[in-house]
Amino acid sequence: MLLLLTLLLSYTGYSREGRTVYRHYCMDCHGESGGGDGFNAYNLDPRPRSFADSTFQAQHSDSDLVAAIRSGGALHRHGTLGPDTV
């Protein structure tokens, strides 16, 4: 399973809720399977990360990855996902 999606699901405790949150906030840019190839990805600079990038994941702690999920990464500055969601 993709690490970031797994983190999202494990922090919410409910896979159905995690899937809903991912589809609402992440899928448009990161794609259905987390490959960084969502329909809006091609309009973004920098492009969304692929959650399958094990090299990137190995270079960051779980807390770094959770922080990126909460803030939405480089482009999403709204901080839409709070501690009770992630």
Image (cartoon, grey):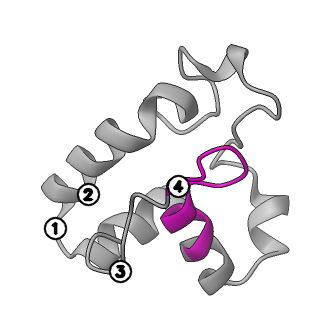
Alpha carbon separation for disc pair 4 and 3 = 20 Å
Q: Residues within 10 Å of mark 4 (few under 14, many from 20)?
A: some
Distance between the Cα atoms at labels 4 and 2? 13 Å
Location of mark 3 (residue): 83
- Residue picked out by circle 4: 2
Q: Is residue 33 above or below residue 11?
A: above
Q: Amino acid at mark 4?
A: Leu
Residue depicted at x 60% and y 53%: 77
Earlier-in-chain disc, 1 versus 3? 1
Sequence-first disc among 4 and 2: 4
Q: Disc 3 vs disc 2: which is toward the camera?
A: 3
Secondary structure beneath label 1: loop
For image coordinates 66% across by 55% down, the residue present is 73
Q: Mark 4 or 3 closer to N-term?
A: 4
Q: Are marks 2 and 1 in contact (CB under 8 Å)?
A: yes
Disc number lying in front (4 or 2): 2
**Separation of marks 1 and 3 at Cα, in angstroms:** 15 Å
Q: Quadrant of residue 34?
A: top right
Q: Which residue is mark 2?
A: 18
Sequence order check, earlier mark of 3 and 2: 2
Queried whether the magenta region covers residue 71, the answer comes back as yes
Q: Secondary structure at mark 2?
A: helix
Give the residue displayed 68% in from the left and 79% down from the top. 64
**Residue type (three-letter) at the residue carrying disc 3:** Pro
Q: Nearer the viewer, residue 49 or 3?
A: 49
Q: CA distance from mark 3 to mark 2?
A: 13 Å
Residue designated by label 1: 14
Q: Which residues are magenta?
A: 67-78
Q: Is residue 62 above or below residue 12?
A: below
